[in-house]
Image (cartoon, helix red, strand yellow):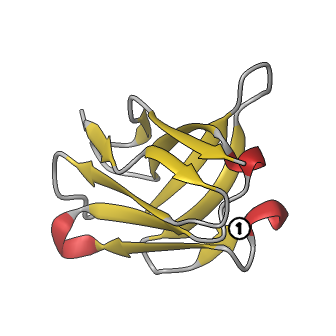
Amino acid sequence: QVQLVESGGGLVQAGGSLRLSCAASTSIFSINVMGWYRQAPGKQRELVATITSLLRTNYADSVKGRFSISRDNAKNTVYLQMNSLKPEDTAVYYCNLGIIAGKLEGDYWGQGTQVTVSS
């Protein structure tokens, strides 16, 4: 099993920046995808950004040009740099790890971290 530990959420004014981090508890050698999802009150969880172990990225249209996802495979960590934050970015942000094959194959989630953007 793999545990994911998130950090970096908080309260920020509109136009500000935050950086989220998510560390996996073990090294992962199989092909995998790490990403961030978010869920606002009363809404479904939605994809924010993903990055594969080969560093291919994907972003939701709503965050393109403002958010940047990156990873450090040596530290088993994925980051989400969020700039030009808007009140509509307010949500609980969840880290996700999908391992495609191997004995750790599966879908893992972090506990979530709150991001609140004030207007």
Q: What residue type is labelled 1?
A: Tyr
Give the side of residue 101 with respect to residue 94, left or right. Answer: left
Q: Position of residue 6 (x, y in %)?
A: 33, 44
Give the total number of marks visible in the rendering.
1
Secondary structure found at label 1 = strand
Q: In this view, does 57 lie above or below 119?
A: below
Quarter of the image where the N terminus is located = top left
Quarter location, residue 68: bottom right
Label 1: how many Cα within 10 Å (few below 14, some 14–19, many 20+): some
Quarter location, residue 29: bottom left
Quarter location, residue 38: top right
Residue 62 visible to the viewer = yes
What residue sits right under mark 1 in the picture?
Answer: 59
Residue 31 visible to the viewer = no
Say which residue appears at 52% left-offset and 66% top-offset. Answer: 17
Q: Which of 49 and 67 is in front in this view?
A: 67
Q: In this view, does 13 lie above or below 54?
A: above
Q: Position of residue 30 (x, y in %)?
A: 33, 62
Q: Is residue 19 above or below residue 106?
A: below
Q: In this view, does 1 lie above or below 99?
A: above
Q: Which residue is farthest top?
A: 42
Say which residue appears at 75% left-offset and 73% top-offset. Answer: 64
Give the side of residue 119 with respect to residue 61, left or right. Answer: left
Q: Which residue is farthest right?
A: 61
Q: Where is residue 35 in the image (x, y as percent from the top left)?
A: 52, 56
Say which residue appears at 52% left-offset and 52% top-offset. Answer: 12
Q: Where is residue 83 in the image (x, y as percent from the top left)?
A: 59, 71
